[in-house]
Image: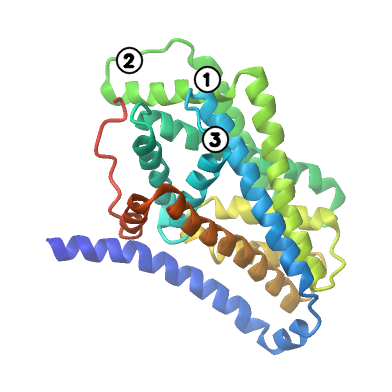
Amino acid sequence: MLNDVSARKAGAIVLPTLIAVGIVAYMLYRVWGDLLLTLEHVVVPFLFLAIGVCIFAWFLRGFRYRYILQGLEILRGVWFSTACILISQTANLVVPARLGDLVRLLILKHEDAGTTYSQGFSSIVVERVFDVVMVAVLGVLALPFVLDVPDWFFTVIGIPLAAGGIFFVALLAMGGVQSDNRYIGILLRILGDVKAASLRPRALATLSLSSLLIWVVDVLVCVAIVMMFQQAIPFAVVVLAIVIGNLVKAVPITPGGVGTYELALALTFELAGTPAATATLIAVLDHLVKNMVTLVGGVGSIYYFGDWAAALLKRAFHRDLRVEESFGE
C-alpha cells in the first residue's frame, strides 16, 4: 500500500514534468538548424536588463500581497510578503497543480498563530483572481492593435473575463448567506474574506491598477529579451504573447507552466512574422529568466524565514504538504 502511494506521488510529478520537457524539446528540435545562427546576433546587456526588471516585478507583487493581507487584518511588511510569494512559487516550479501554494498557508500560520488557514487561502484567491482577470483585460487592450488575430485568442481572453465577472457578481450577491453545514460554512467564510479584502471601492481600484502594473512590467521583461535578439516586434504583439502565455499557463498542466507557456509565446510571435527559431528562443529565454529569478528568490526566502522553511519546501517537493488543522480555526 505504501509503495502504491509513493508511486502515485512520483507519477503526479514525473508525468507533468515529462510533458513540459517534451514540449520544449520539440520546440527546439524543429528549429535546431537555425538556433546557432540566431544566437550569434544576441546583445547580452539586454539580458541583465530583463533580470533587473523581473526582480522589480517581484517586489511589486510583494507590495500588492501586503495590501491583500492588510485587507484580511494580517499586518506584514513588503519583505515578508515578497518572500512568502517567492517561496510558494518556487514550490510551484516543481509541484504540479499549483499545490505549492499550500506553502504560503503554512508560512502565514507559522509566523502568526492568530492567522487562520481560511484567511491564507482567501489571500491566494484574491491574488489569483486579480492576476487572471487583469491580464485578460490587458489582452483586450492589446487586441485592437494586432492584425489577423486567431479566433481562439478571443476565447482564451474571454473565458477568464466572463468567469471573473460571474465570480464578483456572486460575491456581491452572497450578502448574509449562512449555513449550518461545516464545509459550506468554511466556503462562505473564505468568500466573505475575499469580499472584504477586494470589493471595497478603494481595494478594488488599488488591486486592479497594481495588477495591471505588475503585468505591464512582466511584459517589459519580454521586451528586453526581444531587444536582446534585435527583433522589431510591435509592443502590442509582445503584450498579447504574454497575455496568452499566462492564461494558458494558468491551467496547471505542467509544473510552473513550463512548455505550455513557451509554446503559446512562440506561436504568437510566429503569427506576427517572427522567424520560428527566434520566436522559440525568445519564449524559452523569457520563461527561463523569470523562473531563475523565482528560484533564486525562493532560496533567499528560505534564509529569510529560517531552517524550518527549508523543511517545508522539501515536504512540498515530496507532495507531503498537509493543512493539519481546520480551515475554521
Q: Position of residue 19 (x, y in %)?
A: 46, 69
Q: Mark 2 or 1 closer to N-term?
A: 2
Residue 179's label in the rendered image is: 2
Residue 122 appears in the figure: yes
Q: Residue at (44%, 51%) from the top-left corner?
A: 98
Q: Is 302 or 180 nearer to us in this picture?
A: 302
Query: What secondary structure is marked by label 1?
Result: helix
In the depicted view, which residue is nearer to us: 109 or 215? Answer: 109
- The kind of residue on which mark 2 rests is Ser
Label 1 environment density (alpha carbons within 10 Å; few <14, some 14–19, many ≥20)? some
Which residue ends up furthest to the left in the rendered image? 1
Q: Of the numbered discs in the image, which one, if any, rests on residue 196? A: 1
**Percent x, y for residue 47?**
73, 68
Q: Nearer the viewer, mark 3 or mark 1?
A: 3
Rendered image: mark on residue 77? 3
Query: Which type of secondary structure does the marked residue at label 2 adopt?
Result: loop
- Sequence-wise first label, 3 or 2: 3
- The amino acid sitting under disc 3 is Gly
Q: Is residue 58 above or below residue 161?
A: below
User: What's the residue at 64%, 82% (across, down)?
Assistant: 30
**Which is in the foreground here, disc 2 or disc 1?**
1
Residue 282 appears at what percent x and percent y?
71, 69
Instruction: Name the quarter where the C terminus is drawn.
Output: top left
